[in-house]
Amino acid sequence: MTEVVVYSSNMCGACEMVKGYLELKNVNFVEKNVSTDLNGRSELTEQGFDSTPVAMIGDQWLSGFDVKEIDAALALIGQTE
């Protein structure tokens, strides 16, 4: 079961920041680019989101790039440095 999914889109600077931050923390994640992945886009809109980035960490959905929110969600799934 994947615990971290990043919903991104083309030409999204904040998406690159989320992915880069997770990589920096050595967190494995699955990326779903909603510009090309129609299933990913459906998953995102079903959760009420219409823009990227959105990260699903464990059972938490986080919109945008907020280091404190990401760190708190990672801690809940045991992904701490």
Image (tube, rainbow, N blue to C red):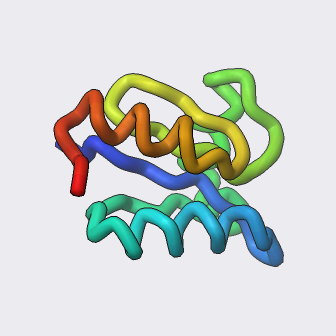
> Who's the residue at 79% across and 69% down the image?
12
In the rendered image, which quarter contains the N terminus? Answer: top left
Q: Give left or right: position of 25 versus 10.
A: left
Task: Pick the residue in front: 41 or 26.
Answer: 26
Q: Residue at x 68, y 38 (%)?
A: 63
Q: Where is residue 19 shown, x and y percent of the image?
A: 52, 68
In the picture, measured across the screen, residue 21 lies left or right of residue 26, that is right
Q: What residue lies at 63% left-to-right and 23% top-to-bottom?
A: 47
Instruction: From the viewer's perspective, tell me whether residue 42 is left or right of residue 12.
Output: left
Q: Position of residue 60 (x, y in %)?
A: 46, 26
Badge count: 0
Q: Is residue 77 above or below residue 47?
A: below
**Is residue 22 found left or right of 38 in the rendered image?**
left
Q: Position of residue 50 (x, y in %)?
A: 81, 38
**x, y (%) of residue 5?**
43, 50
Specify the quadrant that holds the C terminus. bottom left
Q: Quadrant of residue 37?
A: bottom right
Placement of 64 over or under 59, stated as above or below: below
Residue drawn where x is 55% and y is 40% of the image: 68
Question: Image quarter for residue 25?
Answer: bottom left
